[in-house]
Amino acid sequence: MRITQHPILTFDRGKEIHFTFNGQPMKGYEGETIAAALHAAGVKELAKSPEKHRPRGFYCAIGNCASCQMVVDGEPNVRTCITLLKEGMQVETQEGKGRIK
Amino acid sequence: MKEVELLVIGSGPAGLCAAISAASSGANVLILERSFRPGGQLIKQTHMFFGSESQYASHRGVDIAGILLKKIEEYGDRIEIMLNATAVGFYEDNVVTVLKDETKYFKVKARSVICATGAYEKFLAFPNNDLPGIYGAGAVQTLMNVYGVRPGDRVLMVGAGNIGVIVSYQLMQAGIEVVAVLDAAPRIGAYLVHASKLARMGVPILTSHTVKEAIGTDCLEAAIVCEVDDRFRPIPGTEKRYDVDVMCISVGLSPLNELLAMRGVAMKYVPQLSGTVPMRTESCETNIPGIFVAGDASGIEEASSAMAEGYLAGLCAAAKLGYEPADFAQRRQEYLDQLANLRSGPVGDRIRAGMKISQL
Amino acid sequence: MFEKTGIASREMVMEKFPPVERINKGPVAVVECYQKIPCNPCQTACPVGAIKIGEDINNIPVRDENLCGGCGVCVARCPGLAIMIVDGSKSAETVEFRIPYEFLPLPEAGETVIGLDRAGQPICKALVRRVMNPPSFDRTPVVTLEVDRKYLYDFRNFRREA
C-alpha cells in the first residue's frame, strides 16, 4: 500500500521500525504515525465501538475525532493517527472505551 | 508558569504568518502546535495555491510551509515553536493550560493571544458511515502526501468543493483510481479550473447526487449513490452502485475555536463562515482586548486569506503590546487591501456576507 | 452545464482561442479561465505583459494575442493548469499543443498517445514531440503534442497507451 513514485513528492522514509499489532510482528518507518504504518500494511480496522462492537478505522488524521484510538504499550485511547511509531511498540485493537490502569 | 508576550495557538498558515508578523515588529512569540510537526495542513498540499504573490500564489502549499518556517527561523531569538503541545484550556486571566507530550501539564500566561487553531472536517449521515474505508478527504490527503501510503485502490469522492476535487486529482497523481465525485448541490462548489482538471482525466462529477448507504462488514466494499431533487430528497429508482474500498468525505469544514468560547469571547453562528465563529474587529481582535483570531478558526476560507489574516493579526497584536513599527498604518492597510481583494469576487460573496455579520 | 460537470462547452472554448490566422502565425497561449476567482500568477508570470488581470485579482485574465509570443512560462505557473499553447505554424494538417501534465510515467518524445477531450474521452491519436520538465517549471511538466487540426477545439489532454 506504499506509494513508490509520485510526480510531485519524494518520500524519504526513515529507518525501519519494528512493532507488533495484536502480537503479529510488523514493520514501519521512522517518522510515520502508527495509523499510517498499519494502513500501509493493509490494516484498516483499528478499534471496535463501545456498544455495538462495530469496526472503527482512521478518519480525521489530525487527532480530533477519536476513531483511531488503540491500545499502545498497554495504554488505551492513544490517538494513533498522530502518534509516531517507536521501535518495539505493542499496538492492539481497542475494544470499546479501554481500561485505564 | 511560563510567561510570554504573545501566544499563538496553531502553526498552520495563519499561525505562522501571525508569528512572523509580530516578531518582525519586535514581539516575543510562543507558538503552540499540537502536532509533532509545524505547518498545519500546508504540509500535504501538493497543488499550487491561488491568490497573488503576497500569499505565495503559484507555489505548492507544501513548499509554502517551508518558506514560512524559514522566515520563522530568521526570528529564532524571538519565536519559539513548541511541538506536541495542545492548548486544552483558556482562562479569564489569559492563562492557557497546555498538555505537552501527552504527559506534562502546565500553564502559560500570555499578555496577548492569537488563536489560529484551524478547522476540522465535517461528516455526513448515511447508513454504515462508520465503516473503515470511509475517511475524511483531508485525512486521505495526509495519508498519501505526507506518509506516501495509498488509502486503497478505488475511491468515491463525496463533495465537489475545492478539497474534494483537489484530493481527487491528487489521488490520481498517486496512481489511485477515482470512480466519481458527487455532490448534493446542483453546482460544483470548487473553483471550476480544478473541476476541469479532473473532468479531462475522465472522472465524472455528479452534481445533485448523494450517498444513500455504504455496504460492507469489516470495511467498505461498495457505495450506493442516488440522485436528489432540488430540495435534496433522494429520487427513488436512481440508485447506482460503485464497488469501492475507499470513500472520501469532503462536505466542508467547521471552525475549531472552542478555546475562544471557553475564554468567554463573544461567539456567533454564521452559516456563511461554516459554523460558530468569534465576533471580531477589522483587525482580527475579539471583544476581549488582546485576544485575536486568524485563519479558519474565524471562518472557513482559503489558505491565502488565512495567511493575510495571520499577518494582519500579528501586526495588530504586536502593536497593542507596544511594538508598533513606523509603517504600522501602511502595513495594516496593505493587509486589509489584500483581504478585500481576495474576497471581492463572486466566490467571496458568502465570505463578505459572513464578515459583515461577525464584525464588531 | 459547465458548473455541473466542469466541462466547458465548445462555444466557451472557441471564445478563448485567437483566430486561426493568429494560430497559424506561431505559438500563442489559450487561457481557459472562465470563472472569477482570486488568482493572478499568469499575469505575474508573463514576461511581456501579454496577460492582464488588473487591479481586482478576481478579474478573468485577458491575453493579448499580438503581444503573446507563446513562450509558455504561464503554462506551468497557472495553479488551475488552465493554460495551453497552440501553434499552427508548423503544418497545414496538424497543430501543436503544449499542455501541462502532472502524472507519471511521463511520455517520451516520439511516442504516440491517445488524445482526450475536455471530458477525458478518447478522440484521436497524438504524437509526443517534446517533454519539458526544467526546475523552473516546479514539477509541472509541459508536453508538446502534434494533433490533427480538426481537433483544434477538442483536444485537451492525453493518456498513454495501456
Image: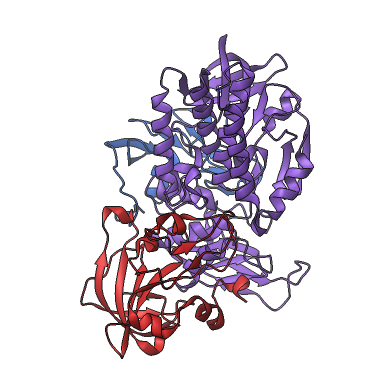
Q: Position of residue B133 (x, y in %)?
A: 52, 55
Above or below: residue C122 compared with residue B252:
below
Q: Quadrant of residue B98?
A: top right
- In the rendered image, residue B257, in percent from the top left (x then y), is placed at 67, 34
Chain depicted in red: C
Task: Locate residue B141 relative to residue B182 in the image: left or right.
Answer: left
Location of the N terminus of chain C (image quadrant): bottom right
Q: Can you say whether A75 is above or below B235 in the image? A: above
Q: Colour of chain A?
A: blue
Q: Which residue reaches farthest top?
A: B1
Instruction: Look at the image and tell me whether residue A23 can be seen.
Output: no
- Which is nearer the eye, B166 or C20? C20
Residue A42's spot in the image, x, y percent?
40, 51
Q: Tell me which residue sits at (61%, 68%) in the image.
A: B224
Residue B348 left/right relative to B169: right
Total numbered labels placed on residues in the image? 0
| Chain letter for the purple colouring in the rendering | B
B276 to B197, vertically: above or below:
above
Of B101 and C89, nearer the camera is C89
Q: Pick whichever, B122 or B119, lies toward us.
A: B119
